[in-house]
Amino acid sequence: MPPNLKLQCHFVLIFLAALRGNGRYLELQEAADYDPFLLFSANPKRDVAGEQPYSRALRCLDMLSLTGQFTFTAARPQLHCAAFFIGEPEELLSIHFDLVSIDCARGDILKVFDGWILKGEKFPSSQDHPLPTTDRYMDFCESGFSRRSIRSSQNVAMIFFRVHEPGNGFTLTIKTDPNLFPCNVISQTPKGRFTLVVPRQHRNCSFSIIYPVVIKISDLTLGHVHSLRLKKPSAGCGGKGDFVELLGGTGLDPSKMMPLADLCYPFQGPAQMKIGCDNSVVRMVSSGKHVNRVTFEYRQLEPYELENPTGNSILEFCLSGLETPAPQPPCC
């Protein structure tokens, strides 16, 4: 199966299982005509000058990686619905409600969340997002058309909605804006290359990959020199305010994942780590005193790599092996 199709299935199974509380996998028994491959476009259609915006119906459980106008109309009472939106790493999402016809007094809901939330776990985590959790929600039943638009703080956002009356629903438009310094990102693809830059800002930034992966760090620039080590209880980067950590876990929230390694000194790689967890994260912690930068590549682990791990192992959590370069003395 091509990687893009694997990605579509992987995302769909995670989201549907999480929304319905059935654990990691789900048998799609309720909708024989429900095509999961349509939930995540392998080649997202972008607006082009002179073309009509893309439009289609929005499903009760949906995922979109494209811009355009989308309409949800309830054919029957729909009580547990959500739509996940994802852009490129360097994009912010803008959600604008063009038309809303719901009955808030009857219990209908329409809420936007700045990020993703699944089974109580948030991305970005509360530690990494610039806003408190309560301010990350926009409730249409409370604000009405006084706040018709919301822009995300990263490349993902989502809506929750409940509609009781058949024929009711809403229409929204998704657009994207450039993000010069992407901070928190969920990758659309199982492989890629990215440079995370934090320019003298006191903030934490996480790059999340919803796959078991091998991560190869080729360049790390920090504001101090220290050491690189495997994570141990009470270990770390010696209280330094600028470092990168590699995390692994089964959920979405980086703050609830296991720290697997700290990278505490500037170097030019490669430093490679295999993380056999469902979700892998490269997280940069910045004090705001320096310009910090990390460049890395990642790819999904093959099944045989999960069955036969090589390198040093962290057996107590996930399936990991670390290969790192020896520290080099400063040049010149």
Image: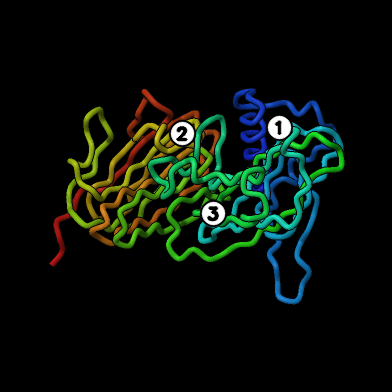
Label 1 sits on a secondary structure element that is: strand
Q: Is residue 115 visible?
A: yes
Tell me which residue sits at (25%, 50%) in the image. 242
Q: Identity of the amino acid at label 2? A: Gly
Q: Which residue is mark 1?
A: 80
Please name whichever residue, 302 or 20, is drawn nearer the observer in this view of the structure. 20
Query: In the image, which is nearer the foreground, mark 2 or mark 1?
Result: 1
Colour option used: rainbow
On screen, residue 167 versus residue 151, left or right, reads right
> In this figure, which residue is indicated by the disc labeled 2?
276
State the image coordinates of residue 252 (x, y, percent, origin top left): 50, 36
* Label whose residue precedes the other's in the sequence (2 or 3): 3
Residue 154 position in % (x across, y down): 50, 53
Query: Label 2's element?
Result: loop
How packed is label 1: few (under 14 Cα within 10 Å), some, or many (20 or more)?
Answer: some
Q: Quadrant of the N terminus?
A: top right
Depth order, front residue of 34/60: 60
Q: Residue furthest bottom?
A: 50
Could you tell me if residue 7 is visible in this image?
A: no
Tell me the quadrant of the picture where the C terminus can be found: bottom left
Badge 3 is on which residue?
A: 152
- Identify the secondary structure beneath mark 3: loop
Residue type pointed to by label 1: His
Which amino acid, mark 3?
A: Ser
Please provide percent x and percent y for residue 235.
22, 33
